Every structure is written in C-alpha cells, then in structure tokens.
Image (cartoon, rainbow, N blue to C red):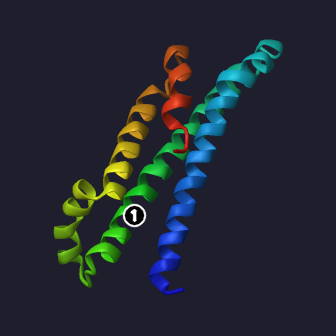
Amino acid sequence: MSTTEIIVASLRGAHVAALVSLFGTLVFLTLVARAAMAEAPVDAPRLHWRLLRLARVSTAFALVIGTAWLVVETVVIAGTDDIATTLRALPVVAWQTQFGQWLLLRGALLLVVLGLLRPRRAGLAVAPMLGAPM
C-alpha cells in the first residue's frame, strides 16, 4: 500500500468511526437514556448535556474528517501534486463524481444534524435517522 492509500483508508475509517459514534450516541439519547434520566432526575440534565456534547463533537469530527477525505481523494482522482492544482480540482471532484456527491450529501445531512442537537426533544427524534452511517 502506498502512503496515499493508507491516508485515504485512515480518513475513511475515522469518518465512519465518527458517524458510528454520532449514531450510537443519538440512539442512546433518544431511546435508552430517557428511562435512566426518569429514574435519576437530579443527574438527568448533566447526562443529557454530556450526551449532546458527545454528539456535537462526533458530528464536527465527521465533518472535518469528511472534508479532509474529499481533499485527499481529489489528489488521488485528479493526480495533483500541489495545493493550487488540488484546490482547482476540488469542485470538479466534489460535484462531478459519485463519491463527491455522496460525501457532499452526507456533509449537508451532518450540518442539519448539528442544527438539531439542541436540548429540545423534537429535533433529537429526527437526528438519528439523518446521522446514520450510510
């Protein structure tokens, strides 16, 4: 394996790990933690806040790593060797390849999830479906 292939695989793995962390946290928060918080009302706000923070961190991590993955894949797909050429090729790879389109869609869904990660419950019910690893 070349260094570039190792970097691409590592970024993909880190991106998927962040998505799994996000999804697991949201499912736990919406399905499991409610019962636990009902039994311990004193600790419930702190647990709720920590789970929301973990979900936000996982979402931000997935967005940052997804962006890095898109840039490295642009280097691979376009065969670029400097930053200027990579930046010129980035929109082409993002909008005109299936990989880029899927990653942009996932990024848009993650931005929506980030907006839903508020203490109110209505947004939290939808967030696990949007944040699920595809």
State the image coordinates of residue 36 (x, y, percent, origin top left): 80, 20
> Pointer 1: what residue?
68
Classify 10 Å Cα crowding around label 1: few (below 14), some (14-19), many (20 and above). Answer: some
Secondary element at image label 1: helix
Above/below status of 101 relative to 28 = below
Q: Residue at x 25, y 81 (%)?
A: 80
State the image coordinates of residue 111 (x, y, percent, origin top left): 38, 38
Which quadrant of the structure image shows residue 4?
A: bottom left
State the image coordinates of residue 44 (x, y, percent, origin top left): 72, 20
Amino acid type, mark 1: Ala
State the image coordinates of residue 96 (x, y, percent, origin top left): 23, 57
Q: Residue at x 51, y 37 (%)?
A: 131
Seen from the viewer's position, the closer of residues 72 and 1 is 1
Above/below status of 119 relative to 54 = above
Above/below status of 92 relative to 114 = below
Seen from the viewer's position, the closer of residues 101 and 59 is 101
Quarter of the rendering occupied by the N terminus = bottom right
